[in-house]
Amino acid sequence: MDCVYTSLRRRPEVSPAPAGEVAEVVGILWAHTTPKDGLEHISGSLDSDRVDLLLYFLSPGPASAAINGPLHRAAALLARGHQASPALKRRYLPPAGAPCPQADEPRLPKA
């Protein structure tokens, strides 16, 4: 099993949501997970400007390409959830390094 630590940064103009913010984010991510992701578990916690997440994935087989690795799967899941969820779009900035919607390759962060 592989574990990926990641965060969604809250938009500066948005204040922290009431006590169910982590559960809402986790639920949205589960709603946009596909079997190909191999996601097993998500846990999260709140900070003043973000929600921190631990994503646990099944380890890919030894013959799998890096594109199937846990970092890529985590970035793709966050991007997919953010793109599809009005609540995530409204509350959080787009995930850094998220794959472009038209491509399978991750975007490089702007310098």
Image (cartoon, grey):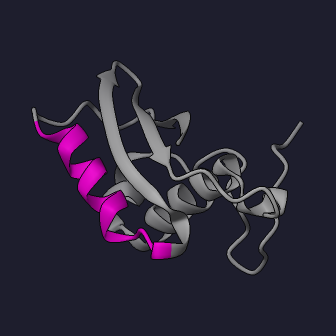
The residue that appears at 30% across and 25% down in the rendered structure is 46
The residue that appears at 32% across and 33% down in the rendered structure is 44
Q: Quadrant of residue 61?
A: bottom right
Please name whichever residue, 110 or 46, is drawn nearer the observer in this view of the structure.
46
Q: Is residue 10 highlighted in magenta?
A: no
| Residue that protrudes farthest toward the top in the picture | 48
| Residue that protrudes farthest toward the bottom in the picture | 102
| Residue that protrudes farthest toward the left in the picture | 19
Please name whichever residue, 62 or 69, is drawn nearer the observer in this view of the structure.
62
Horizontal side, residue 88 vs residue 73: left or right = left
| Residue that protrudes farthest toward the front in the picture | 62
Q: Is residue 26 above or below residue 35?
A: above
Q: Position of residue 92 (x, y in %)?
A: 43, 46
The residue that appears at 35% across and 47% down in the rendered structure is 41
Q: Position of residue 19 (x, y in %)?
A: 10, 32
Q: Is residue 50 above or below residue 106?
A: above
Q: Total of numbered circles in the picture?
A: 0
Q: Quadrant of residue 15?
A: top left
* Residue interval drawn in magenta: 20-35
The residue that appears at 34% across and 18% down in the rendered structure is 48
**Can see residue 10?**
no
Please name whichever residue, 72 or 61, is drawn nearer the observer in this view of the structure.
61
**Can see residue 13?**
yes
Q: Position of residue 76 (x, y in %)?
A: 61, 62
Horizontal side, residue 33 vs residue 107: left or right = left
Magenta-colored segment: predominant secondary structure: helix
Q: Position of residue 72 (x, y in %)?
A: 70, 54
Q: Quadrant of residue 21?
A: top left
